[in-house]
Amino acid sequence: MTHLFDLSDKIAIVTGANTGIGQGIAVALAEAGASIAAVGRSSMDETRSLVEKAGARFHEIRADLGTIAPVASIIEETQKAFGGLDILVNNAGIIRRNDAVDFTEADWDAVMDTNLKSAFFLAQAAGRHMIAAGRGKIINIASLLSFQGGIRIPSYTASKSGLAGITRLLACEWAAKGVNVNAIAPGYFVTNNTTALREDQDRSAQILARIPAGRWGDPSDIGGAAVFLASKASDYVHGTVLPVDGGWLAR
Ligand code: NAP
């Protein structure tokens, strides 16, 4: 039976899938039936076992997305392993914290290269294939910092605001070609990315007090939005940045 959210026979690349939000997304796509090409620089063993437990195929691609050097080979290896490409989730990302007056060029470049440059060029490479096929789904992992300024994370805010803009640009260019480009903006999630925030008791309490849902997000909270944006259910959704934030932006 055809189901709006069914991803059987679909092939998905998920970057940064070894942990946190990327792992949550990989597992949710796998549970919906997708084969997962997991891209990252660390061991994917835990994600492999969760994906295979869901009954889906798994292929690990070791790559450092601090540069765009591995982009072409990521697409080639996915096609070689699974015979196609239907879904790209640009999730890999880093954050560097420092006051704006002290922020270094190295911390600017590292974050922009990983979070924005690699995401764009991976979308470009995947998009070429998807446009030729006349269909495809690209999901960029944005942030509340795609909407808000934040403090002490200038390159992160620039990269995530840029990623929201690139999501809209690609949607405008590719919507008529059958390719959906959208983003998810996670709120505050319990992952490695937020360890420093959660260790700062004052900041952590301030953040929690503003979340209408009354709790931080768990990586398992993000999968539903990813399955929606990867599936037929979102065929007429283009260029949106969907917050999954416990109501943070509604406050
Ligand atoms: P995380 O646990 O730190 O995960 C980040 C992922 O990106 C890891 O898999 C990491 O791999 C990978 N990665 C980083 N640099 C890489 C590189 N050069 N090459 C390949 N992979 C690289 O944090 P997370 O919260 O799950 O973050 C996932 C995404 O969600 C990021 O884009 C982040 O900005 C975004 N986000 C997170 C939150 C939140 O509250 N946690 C909120 C909004 C947006 P390694 O483990 O090998 O470093």
Image (cartoon, rainbow, N blue to C red):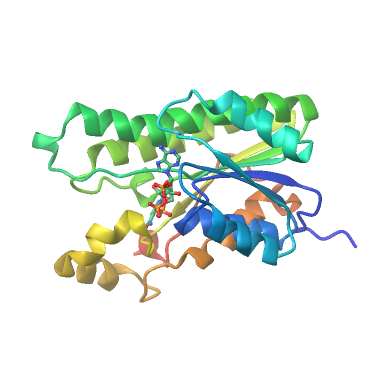
List x then y, in percent, for residue 213. Answer: 40, 74
Count of numbered circles in the view: 0
Q: Say if residue 243 shows up in the picture.
A: no
Q: If the image is split into quadrants, where does the C terminus sit?
A: bottom left
Query: With 163 as the anchor, is 109 left or right in this view?
Result: left
Judged from this view, the residue extending furthest toward the right is 1
| Residue at (45, 38) in percent of width and height | 164
Q: If the image is split into quadrants, where does the N terminus sit?
A: bottom right
Of 164 and 6, which appears nearest the observer?
6
Query: With 69 as the anchor, is 196 left or right in this view?
Result: left
| Residue at (54, 60) in percent of width and height | 46
Of 36 and 45, which appears nearest the observer?
45
| Residue at (80, 54) in percent of width and height | 8
List x then y, in percent, for residue 105. Answer: 20, 27
Q: Say if residue 156 shows up in the picture.
A: yes
On screen, 12 above or below 193? Answer: above
Q: Quadrant of residue 205?
A: bottom left
On screen, 200 above or below 35? Answer: below
List x then y, in percent, for residue 168. Answer: 52, 34
Query: With 104 as the anchor, is 28 left or right in this view?
Result: right
Judged from this view, the residue extending furthest toward the left is 101
Q: Quadrant of residue 56?
A: bottom right
Query: With 56 as the anchor, is 197 left or right in this view?
Result: left
On screen, 86 above or below 219? Answer: above
